[in-house]
Image (cartoon, rainbow, N blue to C red):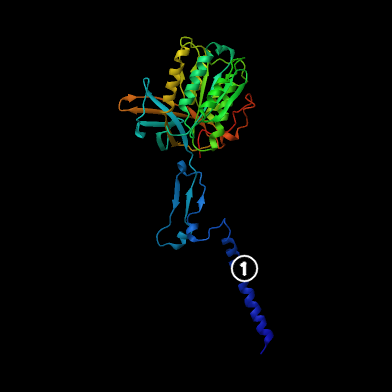
Amino acid sequence: MDYSALLVRLYRRLIGVFPAVLAGFAFCVLCQSPAFPQTRSECETCQVSDPNTPNGGSTEHSSPAGNAADEENSWTIRSRAVEVTVLFTVTKGRKSVNDLIQNEVNVWDDNKPVAKISAFGHQSDLPLRLGLLIDTSDSVSHRFKFEQQASTRFLQKMIRLEKDRAFVMGFSAEPHLTQDYTDDGGKLAAGVSALKPDGETSLFDAVRVSCLKLAETANVGPASRILVLLSDGDDNSSKSTLQQAIETAQRTQVTIYTISTNDVATLGQGDRNLKTLAKQTGGEIFWPGNAENMVKAFDSLEKDMRSRYALSYQPSDSVEDGRFHRIEIKAQRANKKFKVYARQGYYASAKSPNQADCTPSAPGSDCSENGALGHRP
């Protein structure tokens, strides 16, 4: 037997099958990789980002029945949906409207009807994160004692143990924190008592600092972030502007309720500042008129805060373009139209409130790009 010829033929056969063996080995290695689907059923649900899929919906590519080759190449496309959440109150005259249903509410985003309302209901049980910001400048000293008493009573009624948390901050030329986040009514009362009137007024700086502090709660679960501002509305020493204060509140999703310490008949620049802060962020302004009515103002504020609605929707244009998008909400039942108090817009940015470039220690810095969301992904 010619062994040399036999070896030559065997060698040639091995050379012929080697590429197939190598390919099979490579396929097995790739199949073990997490980036590669290991079964045909997994391959059929590969997720592919498709920016052309409208409103974050899903597009499923299915194959004709019985076509095995097409089945092997089928997949599902899912793109992320942008969802905007807004809290609002509804009134008829001076009374709150607490029995609305979803069909009685219409929403527009940048003058376009929204694609879908994904959630609607009352938010009275939502945990509350509240900042009490009190003007301690010389201009409010004549009625400061009444304001402290009314503020303390409000906090002790409003904050629920093991559910809500609040902080107390005063401001004159600079903001000063007298009580950090707590649900302890005694500590909050002590924080209010520690405030002393003195100095100039940096209202807009203090509002921005308070909103950024409220933004610290963004990553601890859903919560209603509210700033209660007690002031005459005047500002004579801020590094920030009124518009910057509003923008910071909008970016951090903080609703501002203002209580004026001015005479109702005055309606000067201070009250206009307070009214603008409240209107632009979805809150309200209250004019007690005198120190004795301060308690009534806080009682009305408490009722408003406990009767808010929460609504989530998907915009028609789900584009995170970083610009300000206007929100308009209308409520109507038959021929009755209601007054809606809601923040007037949001910034379609992909950052979170805690990625702020400015900090409470730098109230004059530019927070216009601090990235606090007006929506959640």
Tell me if residue 10 can be seen. yes
Q: Indicate left or right for 308 with 152 as reference.
A: left
Residue hosting label 1: 22
Horizontal and vertical percent position of residue 214: 55, 30
In this picture, is 22 found above or below 360? below
Horizontal and vertical percent position of residue 322: 55, 33
The kind of residue tagged 1 is Leu
Tell me if residue 282 can be seen. no
In this picture, is 237 found above or below 165? above
Residue at the limit of the structure toward the left, as seen here: 334
The front one of 357 and 133 is 133
Residue at the limit of the structure toward the top, as seen here: 265
Name the residue located 61 percent from the left edge and 19 percent from the top edge.
238
Tell me the quadrant of the picture where the N terminus can be found: bottom right
Horizontal and vertical percent position of residue 331: 37, 28
In this picture, is 368 found above or below 222? above
Q: Indicate left or right for 114 with 324 as reference.
A: left
Residue at the limit of the structure toward the bottom, as seen here: 1
- For mark 1, give the secondary structure: helix
The front one of 290 and 59 is 290
Q: Residues within 10 Å of mark 1 (few under 14, many from 20)?
A: few
Residue at the limit of the structure toward the right, as seen here: 4
